[in-house]
Amino acid sequence: MFKFILPASLIGVAIAGFFIFADPLYQSISGERAQIASYDEALSNSKALEAERDKLTQKYNSFDPDNLAKLQKLLPDNVDNIRLILEIEKIALPYGMALKDVKYDTTSSSTVNSQIGGMQTETGLNKNYGTWNLEFSTQGTYNNFISFLKDLESNLRIVDVSSVQFSSSGNLGLNPSVPEAYKYSFKIKTYWLKN
């Protein structure tokens, strides 16, 4: 009987030793292997992202710098309000139409007003672009006004004319040698990319 107790007790000690020492060590090693696998996966993802970034950088660098400048002017990545006002003034200058009463929002709009059942509500939309409103007035003949609008339309910077108000500046055809001039009040909207 003693012969069976010693091997049974050794088997019991071996099983207890396994659960006390070897199993926690095995679990720890398994956890470390899983962590190493996740690090390897993150490393391979990072290498794939680097390769994609390098490919896109190479493609970006292959573009003509003049075209990139035009694209930046078409839809800038910031409001750039002073440059827009200067561009509009430059467009109006050949027609003798100086900008006056320039007004603009100091905050850029990222919400949209909508009208539901007679109530006006403001809903924030998650857009990749922002809008910026500008108001100004100028004075000139009707022909110069039409030419100014055509030049503003063909300008690279995207500009939507929201409204134009006309008012007479005085002559009203009393002196036929002086062309009739009008005052034009503009409300325009432009766009910019959000980062």
Image (cartoon, helix red, strand yellow):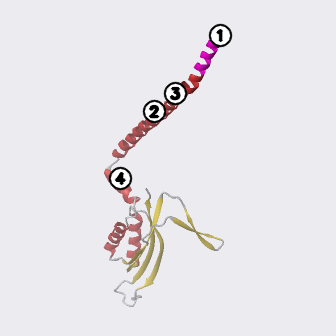
Q: Closer to the observer: label 4 or label 1?
A: 1
Which residue does the numbered mark 4 point to in the structure image?
68
Q: Earlier in the sequence, mark 3 or mark 1?
A: 1
In the image: residue 86, left or right of residue 22: left
> Is residue 156 placed above or below 166 in the rendered structure?
above
Residue reaching furthest to the bottom: 174
Which residue does the numbered mark 2 point to in the structure image?
40
Report how far apart the C-alphas of labels 2 and 4 lie in the structure.
38 Å
Identity, as a three-letter code, of the amino acid under mark 1: Phe
Identity, as a three-letter code, of the amino acid under mark 2: Asp
Report how far apart the C-alphas of labels 3 and 1 lie in the structure.
33 Å
Q: Earlier in the sequence, mark 3 or mark 4?
A: 3
Image x and y of residue 33, in percent: 49, 29
Dot 2: within a 10 Å radius of its alpha carbon, few (fewer than 14), some, or many (20 or more) residues?
Answer: few
Identity, as a three-letter code, of the amino acid under mark 4: Leu
Identity, as a three-letter code, of the amino acid under mark 3: Leu
Q: Earlier in the sequence, mark 3 or mark 2?
A: 3
Q: Closer to the observer: label 3 or label 4?
A: 3
Q: Closer to the observer: label 2 or label 4?
A: 2
Q: Secondary structure at mark 2?
A: helix
Dot 1: within a 10 Å radius of its alpha carbon, few (fewer than 14), some, or many (20 or more) residues?
Answer: few
Q: Which residues are magenta?
A: 1-15
> Is residue 12 placed above or below 100 in the rendered structure?
above
Which residue does the numbered mark 1 point to in the structure image?
2
Q: Residue placed at 64% from the left, 15% from the top? A: 8
Image x and y of residue 145, in percent: 40, 75
Dot 3: within a 10 Å radius of its alpha carbon, few (fewer than 14), some, or many (20 or more) residues?
Answer: few
Q: Earlier in the sequence, mark 2 or mark 1?
A: 1
